[in-house]
Image (spheres, rainbow, N blue to C red):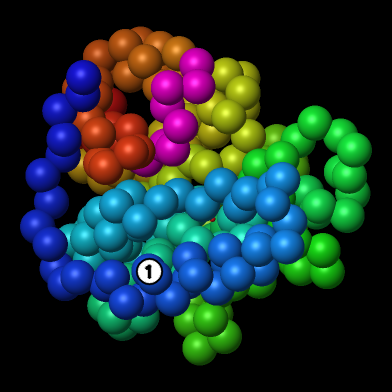
């Protein structure tokens, strides 16, 4: 059991979270065999609190899908009047996978990555559609400074998580935060934190590690 990272509640955004998730689930109502695999409400609130606490100038997330986590991040940046989010996503649409086994982390027919992100929040957002193996190194090459928060929620294969952790770590500010959803899917979070001798935390359902000074 990981220790919960304590973060002060900035303010409760239940109504916003409900609005975004209701909007997403409504689109899925007629596709009962599929689900959007959103980050989740408690993780969403804690993610909001962390962003309000850190107020990062730059943040990167991988894995957008319908855009639940992106909406929360952008809402926090808007409320803080600070920050820019870069997101990377290689989406799968229900139309493309009928009769295949994949049922989760999909887009409803006709929708694009991040479709649920409210228009007024999009000014602080750059979305790159493509594979993280190509897009993440390319993105970090273009950023002028290290990032304040990284959130992994793309493909949860061990290799993909290790790849993103290593790259994000090199491009993360000291004393700042790396988050990952679904850390129980494999041992990547455990192995990465062990190799770097880091303390492991939980933030709701996400794993959290902190880049200590001079790591
Ligand atoms: C769990 S969903 C993201 C959910 C999102 N964070 C939210 O809260 O709504 C994962 C997304 O990552 C995408 N993905 C999977 N493998 C990827 C890869 N190698 N590169 C980029 N995106 C990937 C999936 O297609 C899907 O759109």
Q: Residue 166: tell me if it is visible.
A: yes
On the rendered image, what quadrant is the N terminus found in?
Answer: top left
Most distant residue in the bottom direction: 120
Figure check: 188 above or below 121? above
Q: List x then y, in percent, for residue 108.
A: 75, 61
Q: Residues within 10 Å of mark 1 (few under 14, many from 20)?
A: many
**Residue assigned mark 1:** 17
Q: Is residue 206 magenta?
A: no
Q: Residue at x 29, y 80 (%)?
A: 79
Q: Residue 163: tell me if it is visible.
A: no
Asked where in the image residue 8 lies, by quadrant, the reply is bottom left
Please give left or right for residue 105 compared with residue 143 in the image: right
Q: Which residue is drawn at 25% across and 34% down?
A: 202
User: Would you say the beta carbon of the disc 1 residue lies within 8 angstroms of ligand 1?
Assistant: no
Q: Nearer the viewer, residue 32 or 1?
A: 32
Q: Which of 140 and 124 is in front in this view?
A: 124
Please give left or right for residue 133 compared with residue 77 in the image: right
Identify the magenta region: 178-186
Asked where in the image residue 142 lies, by quadrant, the reply is bottom right
- The residue tagged with tag 1: helix, strand or loop? helix
On the rendered image, what quadrant is the C terminus found in?
Answer: top left
Figure check: 181 above or below 118? above
Q: Which residue is drawn at 36% across and 76% down?
A: 16
Figure check: 203 above or below 26? above
Q: Which of 186 and 35 is in front in this view?
A: 35
Q: List x then y, in percent, for residue 162.
A: 53, 23
Q: Is residue 180 magenta?
A: yes
């Amino acid at each position: 059991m990981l220790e919960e990272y304590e973060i002060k509640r900035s303010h409760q955004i239940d109504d916003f979270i409900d609005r975004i998730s209701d909007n997403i689930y409504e689109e899925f109502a007629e596709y009962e065999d599929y689900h959007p695999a959103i980050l989740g409400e408690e993780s969403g609130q804690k993610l909001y609190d962390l962003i309000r606490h850190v107020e990062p100038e730059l943040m990167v997330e991988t894995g957008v899908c319908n855009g639940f986590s992106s909406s929360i991040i952008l809402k926090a940046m808007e409320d803080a009047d600070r920050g820019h989010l870069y997101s990377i996503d290689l989406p799968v649409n229900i139309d493309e996978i009928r009769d295949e086994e994949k049922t989760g982390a999909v887009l409803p027919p006709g929708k694009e990555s991040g479709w649920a992100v409210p228009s007024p929040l999009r000014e602080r957002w750059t979305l790159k559609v493509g594979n993280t193996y190509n897009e993440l190194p390319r993105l970090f090459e273009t950023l002028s400074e290290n990032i304040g928060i990284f959130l992994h929620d793309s493909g949860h294969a061990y290799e993909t998580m290790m790849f993103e952790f290593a790259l994000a770590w090199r491009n993360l500010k000291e004393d700042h935060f790396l988050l990952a959803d679904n850390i129980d899917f494999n041992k990547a979070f455990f192995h990465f934190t062990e190799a770097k001798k880091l303390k492991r935390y939980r933030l709701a359902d996400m794993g959290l590690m902190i880049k200590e000074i001079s790591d």
